[in-house]
Amino acid sequence: MQSVSEIKSLRSQIKAWRQQGLSIAFVPTMGNLHNGHFSLVEKAKNLADKVVVSIFVNPMQFGATEDLDSYPRTLDADKKGLADIGTDLVFTPTVEAIYPNGLEAQSYVDVPGVSMGYCGGARPGHFKGVATVVTKLFNMVQPDFACFGEKDYQQLQVIKTMVKDLSIPIEIVGVPTQREVSGLAMSSRNGYLSDNEKDTAKVLFQALSNAAKTLGSGNKDFANIEQQAKESLLQNGLTPDYFAIANAITLKPATLEDQQLVILAAAFLGKVRLIDNLQVSL
């Protein structure tokens, strides 16, 4: 596996692969990799001849009070894991390489509509940071495919919308959420949880599953389903940020006419913010 940190070196290798007629799939990450990330790489390997993974903790998507400085960085372990599963190249740029003029002077990409509300409402500026860095990485790697986890469902829809609106010739591929045995969605931030907290955290997936079952039975009292789920989370030690039933594409609140839905949820367990979702087809 190649490891490069300079944009010039990355582009040189991409050019060489293109001259050989090879296709490229890309997996952008912030590191601290787990089996969820590795499932993205495995999917990418099935899509293209070469797989590029980036590891970059993006300061633009963190708020002033969020965990940028303490975000877990495990580069050596990440590289070993990527090499073990057959990644072709890992790209590890510095903040200075991505934002040479600093964040304040950086042009940015804003995706209206799907970026509003939910995590976009709770974390102002977050999706502007995500869309901007992903656009920059897309321009550097120029892949045929890019793989994103469905756990960050709103992020996935933001990226899909951005690519469509800006006519970026990349196929965005969503990859199903990888879960612990308990049902807890795998996340880099799960490392902040104690064993007891991990046991409590599984309640979030249980609430989503119960809501999905209720919808599947034909109940379309969305407001009541959402309220019952929030009460269940509170009763079990989680503080809900949001629990919402939405149109799976637009992310607007679900209507009685919608057939493809997504249940979006975020909750705090201590200082850790957990997110998860389930898609429901009626």
Image (tube, rainbow, N blue to C red):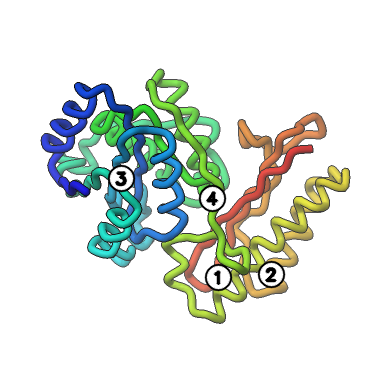
Q: Amino acid at mark 2?
A: Leu
Q: N-terminal of the two: label 1 or label 3?
A: 3
Q: Residue at coordinates 35% horizontally, 44% vertically from top-left? A: 28
Name the foreground residue: 121 vs 205. 205
Q: Nearer the viewer, mark 4 or mark 3?
A: 3
Amino acid under label 4?
Lys
Q: CA distance from mark 1 to mark 4?
A: 18 Å
Circle 4 residue: 151
Q: Residue furthest bottom?
A: 196
Q: CA distance from mark 3 to mark 2?
A: 38 Å
Q: Secondary structure at mark 3?
A: strand
Q: Quadrant of residue 104?
A: top left
User: Are dots 1 and 3 in contact, CB under 8 Å?
Assistant: no
SS at badge 2: helix
Q: Earlier in the sequence, mark 1 or mark 4?
A: 4
Q: Position of residue 54 (x, y in %)?
A: 28, 46
Q: Is residue 23 left or right of residue 76?
A: right
Reply above or below: 159 against 167.
below
Residue where numbered disc 2 is placed: 234
Mark 3 = which residue? 53
| Disc 2 to disc 1, C-alpha distance | 10 Å
For disc 1, the marked residue is 269
Q: Earlier in the sequence, mark 2 or mark 1?
A: 2
